[in-house]
Image (tube, rainbow, N blue to C red):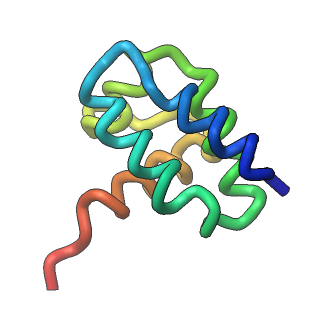
Amino acid sequence: MYTEEDVRRLRWQSRRGMLELDVLFVPFVEEAFTELDLEDQDRFVQLLTCEDTELFVWLMEREVPEDPNMQRIVRIILDRVQPTAG
């Protein structure tokens, strides 16, 4: 379980070198992270260890991560910012 201090630390780690990543990650941590189940929270923490260049191509949907865990958390983030039309 992640404490409020952990979430504050993750918010700081979510500030990346690319604005495109900042605008996805920071609001995600602030608005959605605590609602995830523990396994998905762990996936997000693991995602933050990836290089910005990898993250960028995944989140711009130019490539799909090989790791199924990274595929899952990237999809969760993208689904949150790209709601399906309906």
Q: Give how far across and how far down residue 56 sits, in percent.
A: 33, 25
Give the quarter of the figure containing the C terminus: bottom left
**Quarter residue 69 falls in:** top right
Q: Residue at x 63, y 62 (%)?
A: 34
Q: Which residue is outermost to the left? A: 85
- Above-or-below relation of 33 to 74: below
Number of numbered markers: 0
Q: Which residue is outermost to the right? A: 1
Q: Residue at x 67, y 37 (%)?
A: 45
Q: Give how far across and how far down residue 12 sits, in percent.
A: 55, 29
Q: Give how far across and how far down residue 10 sits, in percent.
A: 62, 36
* Relative side of 49 to 85, left or right: right
* Relative side of 46 to 1, left or right: left
Q: Residue at x 61, y 69 (%)?
A: 35
Q: Give how far across and how far down residue 55 sits, in percent.
A: 42, 27
- Above-or-below relation of 52 to 1: above
